[in-house]
Each structure stands twice: as structure tokens, then as C-alpha cells.
Image: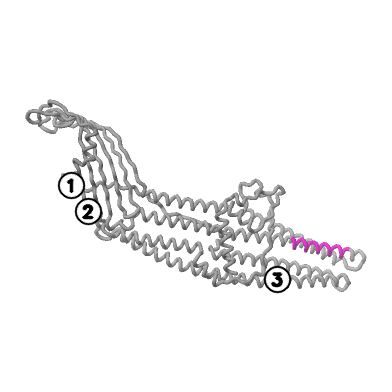
Amino acid sequence: MRKIRAMRAAAVLAALLTAGPAAAQTGTPASGRLELTLEEAVRRAVDHNPELALVRLDTEADAARVGQTRGAFAPVFSTTLGRSSEATPPSSLLLGDRGVDVNDWFSSTGVRQRLPWGGGTWSLSWDAARTTTTSPFTSFDPSLQSGLQLAFSQPLLKDRAIDTARQQFVIARRDRDSSELAYRQSVVQTVAAVKQAYWTLKATAANVAVQQQSLDLANELVRQNRTRVDIGQAPPLDLVQAQAEVATRRENLIRATTAAADAEDRLRRLIMDPGDPSFWHVHLEAADEPDVGAPPPDVDAAVTEALGERYDLARARNDLQNAATNVRFFTNQKLPDVRLEMSYRGNGLGGTELLRTGGFPGVVSGTSNRGFGSVLDQVLGSDYPSWSLGVTVSYPLGTSYDEASLAHAKVERRQAAQRIAGMELDAAEAIRQAGRQVRSTAEQIDAARAGSTLAEQRLDTENRRYEAGLGTSFLVTQAQRDLVQARVTLLQATLDHQSALVNFEALQQAPALGKGEAIGLAGSTVVRMPVPTPSGLFRQTGGQP
């Protein structure tokens, strides 16, 4: 029985989470009266509750953060087109008092990407330039230059197993899953609040009926006493006492009516669409009757199931996994930064070649044209290749930032584990208490029902005694009061039992939402990770690469 009820509750929750708003839309009746079943009230709450909509937006925000972190692995295309002009003063005796003017048209286009595995980055670029110069030593004027370069950088220790980009991506995905769990947790808590409000409305409406019946009984006693006073069978004091009781019971009816209106507004706040023009005017009525007499719950099975499936515990386990990821990341960051750098470039040169005769620097005697097609042949044919292959190594001396961060991450991991242990104890204790409350309230219903039956029998006896002239108006009034109190006690016991059942069911999936408490989500901060451009290794000469 316990498993069947759990499966049924899970199926209802899944249907509520997946059903679209249109599936639950029921228009407000023209009469201004809306009779609701419990299922209809819950479905309306899932569709219209603004707090749920807010939490749902948080899940969408965390999904967007996953997209932000995935962007670190997206290829980056870049292109440059420009023109430059440089005039330099004469710096050589061979130039005399003439300077040199150099004018360039240049462009560069490339793609680079960080790989989502291994931590490597690659780049592929193409560049071309057209240069004119007044230098007497140039062999081409104008000259056409072009090159195609492929470069790759691969970490061998640090950043190989995990780097900052992959750390952010893994944590962002878990945060997205935690946001979905938080939304489901909020749905469970909202459904529980709706059920509580529904049964409270049902009980307060029934209390209005009880108080109205009590007032009717008091009015009937006033009528009977007035008749007896008029014919001299009862003293006027009996009539005054009965009329005073009518006033008291009318006051009780007013209080009961006000409480019912307050309960209706609480349910309205949870289930109605705020944009509906009839939001504050439609009258809500609870159509379902409370289910009493069910067998007591299996508390031990409920605790076992909750420890494996509660949404808050699942979120805490995600936090523990995030802490473990941080430990793994900072452990890796302590390693030496050893990188394999590779690059290859094909070069080409063309343009208008100046043919010279005579001694240095010679006299231009003619020209020979090498078009851009010839330049491309040189580039693709590897006529003038350049390549590099090497390893870079860097390692901080002394206590590094990563060592301190690793110590902090280990503490956070232990805290997360202890937090889960505490939450499991709290969950088990709360469910056990809720199970005892279900049993206790069920027993209270039986006792209250017996008390109500006895109160009815006593009132019936006092009425017969009063009609036979053997009783008094005071005893009838007291019996009426006792009956009203017994019925109110039965209503309260029934409401307490329904509340206990709702609480017991909800606690198996989510913790109770405290007064003034709200679901709050704080997704991880995503730091933008620009893709570096590997360019290979070249010997440093004269301070210039």
C-alpha cells in the first residue's frame, strides 16, 4: 500500500511538471462560483503560482550559464584588414640624406579553438601583404607576401586532465541540474501548501455550517422560551438567557465566516491567475471530502525512500560533487606547467622583381613580375617552410595560490559531506515525527467522533426532558454548547489529520518550507575564458623573437 501511494504521488507530480498551462486551464464560471477538486486546485497552482514561475526562471538562467561555459570551446574566427605607412630617417651611409618610405596593404584571417578534452588549443591563420618602398636595397617593389600557419599547444601536466574552462563547464551543468531539482522541490512545497489551504477552506466552510446550525438551535430555544414565558410556564429570565446565547452564537458565526473568507483568500493566492479580472471576486468551494480511515504509513520505508530521493539531499550531493571537482582542479593546478608547442608556416614572396646590373647595389635594368598565384604555389608547395617544436616549463617557487586554494577546497568538501549527514538526520527525524502525527491525528478523529455522537445523544435527551417539563433551558443550552464544541473538535481533528498526511507525503520529497522562507538559487559565476592563440616557439635574438 505504501509503495502504491508513493508511485501514485510521483506520477501526479510528474504529470504536473510536464503538463502545459493549456492542459489545466479552466475558465472562471460566469456565476462567479468555482467548485474545485483537490487535483484541480493543485494543477491551477502549478500553472499560475508566481513563486513557481520565478524559480522556473532561475532554472533557465542556470541553463544559460551552461551555454556561457560551453562558449569557451567554440571556434573563434578573426580577420584583420588594414593599411600602414612608415617613413624612417636615413640610418645608413648608403642612403645618404634620403629616408625610406614603406607603405603596406595587409590582411590576416584565422580560426582558433580550445579543445574540450586534453586542454589543447590550435590555430590556423592566413596572411597576405602588398608592400611598396623607396629603399634602394629592395629586390621587389611592390612586393607580395603571404603565409599559411598552423600552430598547436598541448599541456602535458597542468591543465591536461582539467582546466578552468572544463571546471566551469562541469560545475555549471551540475548547477543547472540543481536548479531543476530546486524547481521540483518548490513544486512539492507549493502543492503541499495548496493542499493545506484546500483542507483548511473545507474545514472553515464546515465550521460556518456548524455555527449556523448552533445559531438555529439557539433561535429555536428562544422561540420555545418565549412561548413558555407568555403562558406562564417559565420565568422571563429563561428568555433573557436564551437571547444572550443567540447573541454569543451570532458572534461565533461572524468569526467563523471571517475565518472562512481568510482561508479562501489564502487558497486563491496560491492557485488563481493574478491577471484574471475576477481574481478577487470568484467564490471558491472545495468539492472533495477528506479521506479518513487509511492504514497507518510505513515510516521506516518512507525514511529509506526519502534519503535516496529527496530533492534537497540530491542538491546537496551535487554540491559535494562540485567541491570534489574543485579539489581535483586545484590538485591539477599544483603540477608544473609543461606544454608542448608546435607550429608550421609556409611562406611565399612575389611581386615586381627589380633586375639589377653592375656592382652593389647595382642599377635597375629591368623588371620581372611574379603574380600572386606564384606566391600561393610557394606557400602550398612548402618552398620556404618554417617550423618549430619545443617544450615550455614553468613552476612557482614557494607557496602558490593553487596550493592555498586546494587547502580551502578540501575544507569545503568536508563541510559539504558533513552537511549531507546533518540533512539526512533532519530528514529522518522530520519524517518520523510526521508519521507519528498521522497516527495521533487518526486516533484523535476516532475520539472526537465518539464525543460528537455522545453530545448529540445528550442534546436529544435534554430536548425531550425540556419538552416534558423535566429539564431546564440552561441544561439545553449547555448541551447545545457541548455539541457545537464536539463538532468543532471533530472538524479540527479531521483538518489536523489531513494536514499531517499532506506533510508526511511532502517530506518524503522535499523539506518543509519555513515561515517567511523562500527558495533561493545562486548559480555559479561564469568567468569569460578567451581562447589563446598558439604561435609556436622561436629563439630569442637581440630581445626580439
Residue 126 screen position, x and y as percent = 27, 40
From the image, tell me which residue sits under label 1: 540
Mark 3, secondary structure of its residue: helix
Residue 397 falls in image quadrant: bottom left
Residue 489 falls in image quadrant: bottom right
Q: CA distance from mark 1 to mark 2?
A: 15 Å
Q: Decide if residue 32 is on the left or right side of residue 364.
A: right
From the image, tell me which residue sits under label 3: 448
Q: Quadrant of the N terminus?
A: bottom right
First in sequence: mark 1 vs mark 3: 3
The foreground one among 173 and 388 is 388
Q: Which residues are magenta?
A: 209-226
Q: Which mark is residue 391?
A: 2
Q: CA distance from mark 1 to mark 3?
A: 94 Å
Foreground: disc 1 or disc 2: 2
Specify few, some or many for label 3: CA neighbours under 10 Å numbering under 14, 14-19, or 20 or more: many
Foreground: disc 1 or disc 3: 1
